[in-house]
Amino acid sequence: MTLHDYIATFKAAGRVFTLTSPRLLWKFCYNFGWRNLVNMAAFERRQAKGKPFFPAFVMVSLTETCNLGCSGCWVSQGGKKQLTNEQLDGIITQSKKNGSYFFGLLGGEPLMYKGLFEVMEKHSDCYFQLFTNGTLLTDEVAQKLRKLGNVTPLISIEGLKEESDKRRQRDDVYERTLRGVRACRKAGLIFGAAASICRSNYNDLVNRKYIEDIAREGAMYLWYYIYRPVGAQPNSDNCLTKEQIHSLRSFIVEQRKDAPLFIIDTYWDDKGKAMCPAATGMSHHISPSGAVEFCPPMQLAKEWLNEDASNLTEVFNKSEFLAGLRKITAEDTRGCIIMENPQLMREFLQAQGAVDTTTRATVAQEYEAMCPVPGHDMKEDLIPEQNVFYKILKKKYFFGFGAYG
C-alpha cells in the first residue's frame, strides 16, 4: 500500500475504534471479520471442487410490513406476509451448519418484525446487518442493539429533505431518519448509511459534502446501490443513465482515496469489472413468504421453506432453478439481468413455471412491462480500484468464484 492509502484507511478505521466500545469491536472483528474470512474460503473451495452448493451469505426479508410507502420499492405496500420466528431461527441454524454466520436482514421494515431481538440474541455467534429506514431507531432500540452487540444498522437515506419525503411518500422522513442516525451514534453502534442512487437523488448524495456530513453524524460506512425499476411503482424514468453509472463508479473510486468512512459497493471487482453477487452464488435471498429467491428484486421462485426451514440446505444443494439463473445471468452479462435483459429473465422464469412470491401477485405483469435500462456492466470501459486496501478486499470477495469462466 502507498503511504496515502495507509493514511486514508487508518483514518476511516480509527473512527470505528474511537466511537464504539471494545465489546462491540470484538463482536465485529470476530463474528463478522474472522468468521467471514473462514466462510468465504470454504465457499470458494466448494465452488472450485463442484461440491453441493450453499451461498456464502443469505439475505433475509423478514416481513412485508413497513411504516413508509416508498416509490421504487419492490416490497408489496400493505402486504402482511412474514417469516415465522421458527423459520428465521431455522435459516440461521442451517446457514451456520454450512459455515455462514453473517446475515442481511431486510423488510419491509425489519424493526416491525416481532421477535427479532430474541432471535439475534439466541444466535450471539452471528453478525447481522439490519437494513432499516431509521425512523424506528429510537434511543431505546439503539441501546437494545448495543446490548446485543452483534448488529450493524444500515440506515437508508434516499435523498435530502425534499427528495426523502417525495420518495418515501411521507412527511418529515429525512429528519426522522437523522434522529435514528443520532440514536445509533449516541449508543456507540457500528452503523452505516445506504442509498439507492437514481436520477432524482444523484446530486443530493453523490458528492463529497454528503460523505463528510454523514460521517460527522457518526456513520462508519456508506453503501451506494444502483436504483432498480421494480415493484408496483417501478418508474424507469428515474434510472441512472449510462453516463451517470460511469460517473458514480468513478466517484466511488476517487473518494476511496481519502474518505472519512468506508465506501461500500457490491457491483465491481478490483479491476472494475461488473459483478452480480447472485450470479456468483455468493448470496441468495429468502422472502417474507418463505420463498428461496435469486435476489431480493426477483420475486418469482420455485422453492419454499418448510415450517422450521430445516429444508434450506437441501433446497440450495438441489435447486436447478437457482443454478439455472446463475448460469444464464453469468453467460448473458456481468451486470444485472433484471435491468439489462428483462426479456431473457422473463423467458427463463416462464419456462420454469416460477410463482409470484408477493402479496400483490402482479410481478409477472410488472416484468412483462419492463424494458432494458442501463446497468453497471461497463464492458471494456473499466475503472479499477486505486486504494490498495479496497483492491485486496475486492480480490478476496469479488473475483467471480468461477461464474464468469
Image (tube, rainbow, N blue to C red):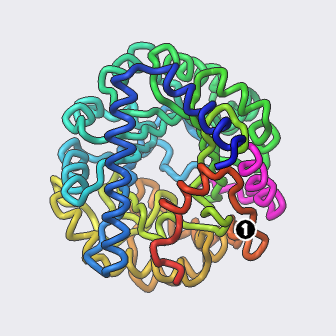
Q: Main secondary structure of the magenta part?
A: helix
User: Residue 289 location in percent, x, y?
Assistant: 33, 54
The amino acid beneath tag 1 is Val
Q: Is residue 34 above or below residue 355?
A: above
Q: Is residue 124 above or below residue 244?
A: above
Q: Give the image quarter of residue 283.
A: bottom left
User: Residue 98 location in percent, x, y?
Assistant: 23, 60
116 relative to 167 in the view: left or right: left
Q: Is residue 205 above or below residue 246?
A: above
Q: Toward the viewer: 11 or 126?
A: 11
Q: Toward the viewer: 338 or 57?
A: 57
Residue 12 visible? The answer is: yes
How many numbered marks does the figure carry? Answer: 1
Which residues are the magenta region?
Answer: 231-255
Question: What residue sits 23% from the left and 31% below the top?
Answer: 121
Task: Tell whether position 237 is magenta.
Answer: yes
User: Residue 210 location in percent, x, y?
Assistant: 74, 32
- The secondary element bearing badge 1 is classed as loop
Residue 80 visible? The answer is: no
**Disc 1 designates what residue?**
373
> How busy is the neighbourhood of tag 1: few (under 14 within 10 Å), some, or many (20 plus)?
some
Task: Tell whether position 74 is magenta.
Answer: no
User: Residue 46 location in percent, x, y?
Assistant: 31, 73
Question: What residue sits 16% from the left and 53% below the top?
Answer: 308
Q: Toward the viewer: 244 or 344?
A: 244
130 relative to 39 in the view: left or right: right
Question: What residue sits 73% from the left and 50% below the top?
Answer: 198
Question: What residue sits 50% from the left and 30% below the top?
Answer: 191
Q: Give the image quarter of residue 341.
A: bottom right
Q: Give the image quarter of residue 182.
A: top right
